[in-house]
Image (cartoon, helix red, strand yellow):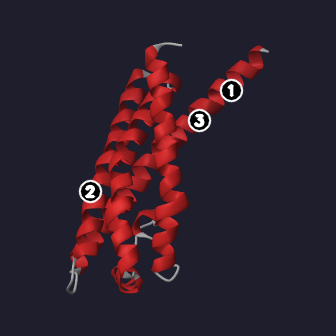
Amino acid sequence: MSRARVAYWAVFAAALAVYGAMVGWTLPAISRDAAGLAPFDMRPMGYSVAEARAFLAALGAEGRALYLGPQHALDLVYPALLAVVLIGAVRALIGPLWLRWGLSLLALGGVAADYLENARVGAMLRDDGMLPGAAITAASHATQAKAGLTSVVMLAVCAGLARAAWTKWRKT
């Protein structure tokens, strides 16, 4: 196996490990500390000003520290790892060059939206006073953009995998 393939699968494994840590540890713990309310990162359709304020009011000191500490540390590396995984899969599975470039740009847009979301959520978590509704709405839009852009690329990768499997199956 080439070095590039080994590196790709190492990044894939790292992305899975980081994602597993988030969905198996930090995000459920944050949710428990917030009376069962979903953390901002787990709301792909976004959230209203009232929903965000309810979450922030319910979130205890331990959950807030977990969100601003380990969760944000994990979410600092995860978007970049995911982008490498998605772009690598797009390069391997998608034929037309224009589509590969377009999907790669969407994946990078998803990364940028994820980092913007992280910054805006961090600001919401550190705010001591009455957070402006515009700040909450901006964070929600970043969450929606992240989810939308990443979902489009993931669907294209799934379609590419299905096409590759179909092609291989027909040859057997």
Residue that appears at 29% across and 53% down: 115
Q: Earlier in the sequence, mark 3 or mark 2?
A: 2
Q: Quadrant of residue 62?
A: bottom left
Query: Which quarter shows the N terminus?
Result: top right
The Cα–Cα distance between marks 1 and 2, rounded to whole angstroms, is: 36 Å
Q: Name the residue carrying label 3.
A: 159
Measuring from the top left, give residue 160's x and y in whole percent.
Answer: 57, 30
Q: Name the residue carrying label 1.
A: 165
Q: Quadrant of residue 146?
A: bottom left
Three-letter residue code for mark 1: Ala
Q: Secondary structure at mark 2?
A: helix
Measuring from the top left, give residue 48's x and y in whole percent.
Answer: 37, 78
The Cα–Cα distance between marks 3 and 2, rounded to whole angstroms, is: 28 Å
Tag count: 3
State whether residue 81 is above or below residue 116.
Answer: above
Measuring from the top left, give residue 147's x and y in whole percent.
Answer: 43, 55
Q: Secondary structure at mark 1?
A: helix
Proximity of marks 1 and 2: CB atoms separated by less than 8 Å: no
Q: Secondary structure at mark 3?
A: helix
